[in-house]
Amino acid sequence: MNQTSPSSPTAATDPRRVAARARLDRLWSAGTRFLGSEVSILGGAMSWISERHLVSAISNAGGFGVLACGAMEPDRLAEEIAATQARTSRPFGVNLITMHPRLDDLVQVCLDAGVGHVVLAGGIPSGPVIRAIKDGGAKVIAFAPAFVLAKRLMRMGVDALVIEGSEAGGHVGPVSLTVLAQEVLPFIRDIPVFVAGGLGRGDAIVSYLEQGAAGAQLGTRFAASTDSIAHERFKKAFIRASARDAVTSVQLDERFPVIPVRGLSNEGSRRFLTHQAETLRRFQSGELTKEQAQLDIEHFWAGSLRRAVIEGDVENGSVMAGQSVGMITSEQSVRDIIAELVDQALDALIRQEDRMRRE
């Protein structure tokens, strides 16, 4: 932690920090206006983790929390939204998976509850779903892992984009955030674009704001916070890990695709390789059909995220984490994390001003 936090009396009266904060607020003003938050920092939607406690903590700390609907049914989602609204009066969003069989019903639950922002993830959303959300008075945020998709989503009417690099935890695309930012940020100015993937410090966030980003989305740092309901063994695994420990799942045979998922290497990930090899052998020997083999591979991780997050089985469960996990050295409250990110951003802007004065 830096010695001067943004909320301290020194920070409030130091002219250089006041000026830096004013500049930071200008840099991410498109994001804060769109989200209705004090700072343009979104919480990544993480299954089993991004629930009422963490989401409300992020929003109450000035950020923008996002509920992870995941596989919830409509009644369960309505209950979680209501519980979150009971814990915060500030804006938050809901992340819906486009492949959910009851997506239309989930959208209606969000609209009925007065949710102002719906995040669509897990695939390209359909035009009717986007229209339904917008007609219901909410904003639509979608993920764009490539520039061509970003342009397509803009034409479809989404209100904001998240470009998430392969450094992120969980399901990831193939391109790093540094490349995506160069492909997208200079060319999309009509709607807010938020960056995500491997972000753990405020000075890094500033660098993307200066390229044109409207804000940033972070998941891994919040997952290990004191406000997260994740098991203590899950959080301790984050604290012990380095960036190189967060690896993507490996696919052994192109005939049996494996969706890339980034998480901490453990006994489960090693057994997954063995399981794929054995399943491939059974397919080649005629014991399994191609369809049976694919299902066998896909079912390996069933329930494993819950085992890690809720039950604390960090050896056999799926410990999804981004490469920013190496920057986590202790459990902090969400409020302290956001204050630290802002403080680091201000330090970066002051250092930049110092360099310009010396030139």
Image: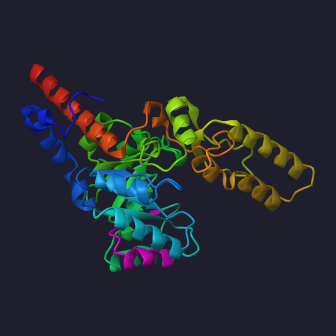
State the quadrant of the C terminus. Answer: top left
Residue 12 is situated, as x and y percent measured from the top left of the image, at 11, 38
Which residue shows up at 76% across the image and 59% down it?
Answer: 295
* Colour mapping: rainbow
Residue 330 is situated, as x and y percent measured from the top left of the image, at 43, 32
Task: Pick the residue in front: 130 or 349.
Answer: 349
Task: Pick the residue in front: 287 or 344.
Answer: 344
Quarter of image, res 144: bottom left
Residue 305 is situated, as x and y percent measured from the top left of the image, at 61, 51
Task: Pick the residue in front: 64 or 55.
Answer: 55
Task: Inspect the magenta stretch and tell me whether residue 108 lies in it.
Answer: yes
Whether residue 199 sits left or right of residue 234 in the image: it is left
Which residue shows up at 34% across the image and 40% down it?
Answer: 337
Residue 50 is situated, as x and y percent measured from the top left of the image, at 46, 55
Q: What stretch is highlighted in magenta?
A: 105-120
Whether residue 271 sits left or right of residue 182 in the image: it is right
